[in-house]
Structure formats: C-alpha cells, structure tokens
Image (cartoon, rainbow, N blue to C red):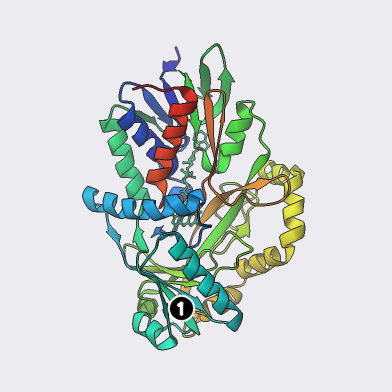
Amino acid sequence: MPVRSDIIIIGGGIVGLSTAMELVRRFPRLHTQLLEKEDALARHQTGHNSGVIHSGIYYKPGSMKARMCVSGAAEMLEFCRTQGLPHERCGKVIVATHQEELPRLTGLLERGEANGLSDLKILSQEELREIEPHCTGLQALHVPSTGITDYALVSGKYAELITQGGGQIRTKAKVNGVVRGNGEIVIETARESFTAKFVINCAGLHSDRISSLAGDNTELQIVPFRGEYYDLIPERQNLVRNLIYPVPDPRFPFLGVHFTRRIGGTVDAGPNAVLAWKREGYKKTDFSLRDTLAELIFPGFWRMARRNWRSGIGELYRSFSKRAFVTSLQRLVPEIKEGDLVPGGSGVRAQALQKDGSLVDDFQFTCTKNILHVFNVPSPAATASLPIGRAIVKMAEEKFNLSS
Ligand SMILES: Cc1cc2nc3c(=O)[nH]c(=O)nc-3n(C[C@H](O)[C@H](O)[C@H](O)COP(=O)(O)OP(=O)(O)OC[C@H]3O[C@@H](n4cnc5c(N)ncnc54)[C@H](O)[C@@H]3O)c2cc1C
C-alpha cells in the first residue's frame, strides 16, 4: 500500500527542509512527507559549502537573491542564536588589488547600500591592515554584517522542528518515478511508493531530472560546477582573521577564491569553479557518462562553452596546479606559500543553464499542475533558506489552494 500524504517534498537539503518546516508550521493539519535519497540529510550542497552567512551585497537590487539574502542573513543569525547553534557575525573584507577593480569596488558599495546595508565602509590600505594585518590591497570594502555558521547543523535543527511539528522525513528514499494520476501524484522509490496531492521538488543537483520524471518539460538544465578548497595548516591560520574575498568578476556568478574562517576555527581557501563531469562528483577524476552526455547534448551547454572557454580552461588549470591556486591567493595575502596549504574538501554547485547558454542568475521556482519545481537556488540560498522556504510555501498556498 502506498504511504499517503498531502504534500511530498523531494530533497533533504536546506531548501527542502526549510520548506517542510514552514509547511508544518503554517499548515499543521496537512500531512507533510520529505523524501531524501541519501542515508542522512544535507549530504550534498548544504553539507559541502563555505558556511558563510552572506550579507546580500553582491546581488542585483530588487532581485529575489538580494531581498531574501539581506533578510535571510538577519534571520539566520537570530535562528542560530535562539536555537543555540554556533554562529558568529565576524564581518568580511572585499579587497581590490588592481586599479581596474576600484570602480567595481565602489559599484559594490552602491549596490550594497541599494540593498539596504547601511554599515559598509571603503577602507584604505592602512585601515585594511588593522582588520586583516596580513592582507594587502589598494582599497577594500568592509562588510560587518557577514557571518559564519554550520549549515549542516542548521539543517539538523530544521529537521528536528519538522518532526516535532508532525511532519515525516524518510532517508534512503530515492525518487525514481513521478506519476500524475487522478487528483493524486504517485511517487516511486525503490522500496516504497508514496501518494500526495501536491509535490515540491527541491532536489538540488537533480531538480531538472525530477521535473523530467514528472513529464514537465524544462527549458533548463542543471550544470554542476565543482568548488575545491585547500585548508590552511594550523601554524599559518594566523594569516587570516576572518573572511577575505577578491572583487568578483561581474561576468561570472561565482565569487572568486577567497579565505574563509570556519565556525570551528580552521581556515580554508577556495572554492574555485570547475565544470564537473558528474553531478555529485567531488573528486577531480569523477566522471559519469550519463551526466556528461546530458551536458553535451543540451544546446545551451555549447553556447555557454563558446562564451566562457577561456575562463573555463583557466579554472581547470588552477584546479590541477596548486601553484596557480596559490598565485590567486597571494593577490590577497602575499605571505601565503604552497607549503601553507593542504588539500581540503569540495562541493558541487547546482547551477541552472538556459537553452540560450546563459546561466540563470536569480532564484527560480516554477509551478506546473500540482508540482512546484525549485530549479535555481545557488549561493546565497543557505543564508536565505528561511525566506526561501516561506516564499515556496506562499507560492504553493496560492497555486495549490492550500488551506489550514
Ligand atoms: C562549494 C559551495 C559553497 C557554497 N557556499 C555557500 C555559502 O557560504 N553561503 C551560502 O549561503 N550558500 C553557499 N552555497 C550554496 C548553498 O550551499 C546551496 O545554495 C544550498 O545548499 C542549496 O540547498 P538545496 O537544498 O537546494 O540543495 P542540496 O543541499 O543539494 O539538497 C538537495 C537534496 O536533494 C536530494 N535528492 C536529489 N535527488 C533526489 C531524488 N531523486 N530523490 C530523493 N532525494 C533527492 C539530494 O540527495 C540532496 O540532499 C555554496 C554551495 C557550494 C556547492
């Protein structure tokens, strides 16, 4: 007999969990079931990120990313405080190291102010040294509201609140079939089937595949970009007090390799952004024929490749050459040497690509009959997970006519 629910959420990362938490809070009489394919929650993007509570400075004013990141950062700090989770509002510096980056730094200041950040400050070289004594640059932007936490722990707390609120979470439940029937959707996993009136697809790196299983043709494809980290050896962690970032290249959605102090006190450097040949490919050598073919036959892939092949080759070179990686970091902290870094972890970003070859910039949610697909929730979606969960549930309430 299939397990019956009112709403099924596919994916136990921070976005699926935040959505489920909001559903049980707003609609306690509906039965909410979350299905996760791994044997534990937060095993992919959510458990492999930098742990930064982003301020919202980078994003286009008025975009969902900007609005939800600014409010989400404040909410995340408050959530961690009230739930007793480790967190710190440590601030960060964005450092201009070349003349041509100075106007972009001013542009970031203006963008941050347009997004409602009122405590930003341009620092001279001397002022920068007071905050980060080993960092050099022509000028820097100080962003005091940036923080750090551990998003796997945050996700664990969301899960606790879901079960306390009456929702159910099943791990080891990989969805391999989505069948629309008469007023019901049947969700198939290897061990059991589930039915629900409504489904919310929060499958991250596989969200486009879940959409295809449901017969919802999508113009988008998820492209995996691996981000690799090095760890600073303990004796050299004193080179970095908090978070040191370069001025991002506006042509790319990634922030450039930077230094991040983790909530546990370690410091890492990265992540780069290398096109991966496997959606959950955490190692350089990971390869999946299925994932690679899917990338290569998607027309948007070749359009993206034509536009970005130079930077793509640069990223690939830096992925294999520690020296090239260190050279990028030395722009920020000249004292860093190859021997100060040891290989660290990695994460794979789910980035939605359109048929015209452009990367989707903003968060993107799409609703077809009875199924809501969350297609693009890259960084800063962990920071913004609380407002994102609320926005998804609001959309579900309207489109599915939910009533409490
Ligand atoms: C390297 C890196 C650094 C980042 N740094 C930051 C940062 O500092 N700050 C920040 O705010 N954001 C950061 N991000 C972004 C952030 O981690 C993601 O935006 C966020 O975790 C997305 O959450 P999610 O729930 O959508 O995806 P995921 O965490 O990937 O969760 C999706 C889940 O769906 C499950 N799933 C997939 N297919 C199926 C299926 N068929 N059946 C059942 N379950 C399925 C997966 O197993 C997975 O658990 C970073 C991301 C990366 C990769």
**Is there any visible trace of residue 281 in the rendered image?**
yes
Mark 1 closeness class: few <14, some 14–19, many ≥20 residues within 10 Å: many
Name the residue rendered at 49%, 79% in the picture: 332
| Vertical order, 253 against 352 (above or below) | below
User: Residue 121's quadrant in the figure?
Assistant: bottom left
Per the image, the residue denoted by label 1 is 140
Q: Position of residue 313 (x, y in %)?
A: 70, 66
Name the residue rendered at 41%, 40% in the picture: 389
Q: Position of residue 180 (x, y in %)?
A: 57, 18
Whether residue 69 sits left or right of residue 289 in the image: it is: left
Whether residue 45 sits left or right of residue 148 in the image: it is: right
| Vertical order, 75 against 50 (above or below) | above
The amino acid sitting under disc 1 is Ala
Q: Quadrant of the C terminus?
A: top left
Q: How many marks?
A: 1
Instruction: Determine whether the beta carbon of the residue marked 1 sits less than 8 angstroms from the nearest atom of ligand 1.
Output: no
Q: Which is more toward the observer, 95 or 236? A: 95
Name the residue rendered at 37%, 21% in the picture: 403
Q: Which is more toward the observer, 173 or 180? A: 180
Q: Quadrant of the N terminus?
A: top left
Name the residue rendered at 72%, 50% in the picture: 357
Whether residue 136 sits left or right of residue 98 in the image: it is: left
Q: Secondary structure at mark 1?
A: strand
User: Residue 42's quadrant in the figure?
Assistant: top left
| Vertical order, 368 against 310 (above or below) | above
**Is there any visible trace of residue 333 in the rendered image?**
no
Q: Position of residue 202 (x, y in %)?
A: 49, 37
